[in-house]
Amino acid sequence: MNAQEVRKLFPILHQEVNGKPLVYFDSAATSQKPVPVIEAIEKYYREYNSNVHRGVHTLGTRATDGYEGAREKVRRFINAKSTQEVIFTRGTTTSINTVAASYGLANLSEGDEIAITPMEHHSNIIPWQQVAKKTGATLKYIPLKEDGSIDLQDVENTVTEHTKIVSVMHVSNVLGTINPVKEIAAIAHKNGAVMVVDGAQSTPHLNVDVQDLDCDFFAFSSHKMCGPTGIGVLYGKKALLNQMEPVEFGGEMIDFVDLYESSWKELPWKFEGGTPIIAGAIGLGAAIDFLQQIGLDNIHRHEEELAKYAMERMSEIDGITIYGPKDRAGIVTFNIEGVHPHDVATVLDAEGIAVRAGHHCAQPLMKWLKASSTARASFYLYNTKDEIDSFVKGLVTTKEYFGHVF
Amino acid sequence: MSSNLDQLYRQVIMDHYKNPRNKGELTDDSVTINMNNPTCGDRIQLHLKVEDGKISDAKFDGEGCSISLASASMMTQTVKGLSVENAVKLAHVFYNMMLGKEYDDETFDLGDIEALQGVSKFPARIKCATLAWKAMEKGVGHQEEE
């Protein structure tokens, strides 16, 4: 993979920020969008914008083909058995909330347990807290090892015959660790629980095969994988989705409507009330084509290399703490001794370098790391080692700057 | 280094960050306000003692960046001795300063606070600087209700 060639397809990267070439190291928050994605969305609005599934007219058919064609692209991308198992949502948060509100509330009661980990993003914690509060079920945490990884023995010890739902993130948005979700799913199933996987940070970077993982639900967002914001996916096994009630009711999702009773469309549409996110789905489809053309394996290898190089270079600077184990995807979370991460991010920004500072929507993990907040550099297919060199230079400048003003 | 950055991290701000004034707790007859900045994790615990409509003492503790902690330090320093009414007025003078608007620099002795003017050039950091002031406003509001 040639990152320099890839960069040419991302117009936003070719600009100066605060008089310096932009170095965008915040892709774990949201990725940038390549020309083919921008053009696919523009083409839809310019040439065939129309509502789906209802028009007899030509544009309506083209829009429906575009929307449903994107669903087939998603199906192939995650290797789902059928497009009936691919539901378009607003994003990972909505996907997990749908499972919690539909499956969770209907199937859990007092005495049941939900198992998650302390490293989860808030969007994979709070929906389960709510289910526990409403149903009387207990929320349990699978403890983490000191380096932030998950020991399967701890999963065995936490997940019991009372556990009804296990929900774990595939790749950590803070530590960059890849969690053994396939093995965790096997333990969940052995105990009769369903397995939910938060794939927000894995789908942009790894080949995902939901049948191989054997997870029951898989949630992800388009905007972290070169697609537009506002759209994501909930994958669910057909047998489970068929049992579940919709969360939103209205147009598009109905079969028959009478004055006092209504019935739902078949899967996947019963979960897609209202006019769907048509342009978003088409953009996501274009993003999938783009990523697959380059190859997820190539992207993953490139990011691993960047993360390794960044950690090597950062370890040359005294007083930098890097959180998490060595093996990781393209995420490096760190702190500079004596300088608050906000201040680090502000000084780096003055150098044109965009990083994230804060708790990364993972307050329980921050607590566990004993850091009130951290800075995070996250890499994607369009980043280069030269940019890491600029970043490392920026870190030295930051240290010197605060050393000087103190 | 850009001059904007030097305006943001003025010496006096760094001094308040490194040597915060009024750090600690007030135990007797004081109001305690916990406030945090949910988007970034900064948090402040502010203790205010109000007697006869006047803020007679103020102390704080917290976690956060240089701007939020320095601002908390300066705020406690400035509001001590002010009437509740004036402290709230001063908070609004400060908010105007943060928003880059014209602000009244005559009614009150702004002292070190004016060093925070540079924050207005960094929109993402304004909420760091205003956290302590919001906590103070909440604290005196609470006091009035009682």
Image: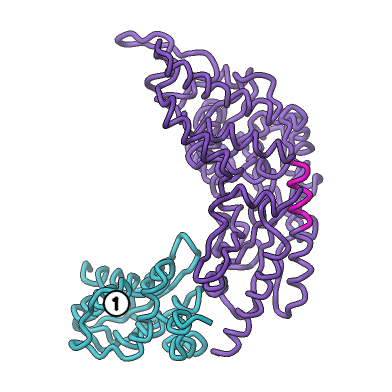
Chain colours: A purple, B cyan
- Relative to residue A103, is residue B122 drawn left or right? left
Q: Is residue A51 a member of the stretch shown in magenta?
A: no
Label 1 crowd bin: few (<14), some (14–19), many (20+), radius 10 Å: many
Q: What stretch is highlighted in magenta?
A: A296-305
**How many numbered discs?**
1
Q: Horizontal and vertical percent for residue A298?
A: 77, 45
Q: Horizontal and vertical percent for residue B25?
A: 43, 81
Tell me: residue A39, above or below residue A54: below
Q: Which residue is drawn at 73% across and 57% down?
A: A148
Tell me: residue A134, above or below residue B99: above
SS of the residue under disc 1: helix
Residue kind at label 1, given as amino acid type = Met
- Relative to residue B76, is residue A133 drawn left or right? right
Tell me: residue A40, above or below residue A48: below
Q: Which residue is drawn at 54% across and 45% down?
A: A123
Residue A252 in view here:
yes
Chief SS of the magenta region: helix
Q: Residue at x 70, y 36 (%)?
A: A292
Q: Horizontal and vertical percent for residue A173?
A: 64, 52
Name the image quarter holding residue A224.
top right
**Residue at numbered disc 1:** B97
Q: Which sits in the foreground, A370 or B128?
A: B128
Name the image quarter holding residue B37.
bottom left
Name the image quarter holding residue A204.
top right
